[in-house]
Amino acid sequence: MTDTPDDPQRAFRARIERYDGGASETKEIAVAVEAPINIVYGDAPYAVMMTTPADIEDFVYGFSLTEGVIAKAAEIRGVEISRQHEGYVASVNLTPDALRKHMARRRNLSGRTSCGLCGVEDFTQLPTAPGKVGERAVAPEAIARALRELHEKQRLFRMTRAVHGAAWCAPDGEILLIREDVGRHNALDKTIGASLRAGLAPGEGFALITSRCSFEMIEKAAIFGAPALVAVSAPTSLAIQRARDLGVTLIAVARDDSALLFHPM
């Protein structure tokens, strides 16, 4: 089962009333949907994530990769998504080898909200990239093109003003795909998952995110194999350090006419 672009769960209507001491006005607006998704590998629940319930299958693939559950898309044989109470259950059918590997390192993350470290008991449990990716320069013209297309393609953001976006871009800045979510980590996981399923080569493009760039975003990009990450907002100190260590080109505070390339001192 896969979400369709016109899935009504992407947004719902709410009535608002202006409350500013002026003339009273009441109207309907679109509001971003947030719902729990329980990810289950085999028969064992792994995590409950709060996400926008669109492109759930993409999210499952990307989350599974960046969590270290799988190393490639072929290790997932299928995903069954069902509605349950106020949320969803994503039952993931792993290959036997992948399931055995997962069960050997399973950790309980119930209640996790994709904040990066919630549920991690010690530093050894942090998902990490297998090695250096290999930095890639991104031309200013490519960044400008990607940002222009980003504004056009963020349909849910235009409706709600309440979601993050993440895109996978060709070297010239063309956006090949984009995903949105109330969670910035989730948006990137969805984009990574969609890229995996589409067979896009990670070494031949760059990731673009609308949110701030923390170290988890660098880790996810590196685990996927992205040589460069462009962020609209600013990075954290650890993001800059991890980008250096993992060989990811980090460009942030990106605008149509400028951007900053970050290096640690």
Image (cartoon, rainbow, N blue to C red):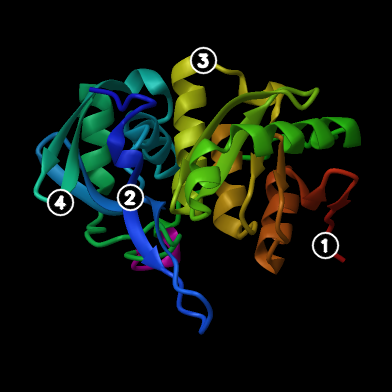
Are circles 2 and 4 on residues that touch, CB within 8 Å?
no
Q: Name the residue under label 1.
A: 264
Q: Do the CB atoms of the residues marked 1 and 4 lie less than 8 Å apart?
A: no
The part of the image, by quadrant, that contains residue 226 is top right
Q: Nearer the viewer, residue 102 or 177?
A: 177
Q: How far apart are marks 2 and 1 (CA)?
A: 45 Å
Circle 1 SS class: loop
Callout 1, which amino acid? Pro
Residue at mark 2: 13
Residue 86: which disc?
A: 4
Q: Which amino acid does label 3 sit on?
A: Gly
Categorize mark 2 by other alpha carbons within 10 Å: few (<14), some (14-19), many (20+).
Answer: few
Q: Give the range drawn in magenta.
A: 120-124
Q: Distance between the residues labelled 4 and 3?
A: 33 Å
Position of residue 91 relative to residue 96, above or below, is below
Residue contact at pointers 2 and 3, CB within 8 angstroms: no
**Residue occupying the point 22% across, 59% down:** 110
What percent of the width, then of the height, locates residue 218?
Answer: 62, 49
3D distance between C-alphas at marks 1 and 3? 33 Å
Residue 116 painted magenta:
no
Specify whether residue 226 is in view: no
Q: Residues within 10 Å of mark 1 (few under 14, many from 20)?
A: few
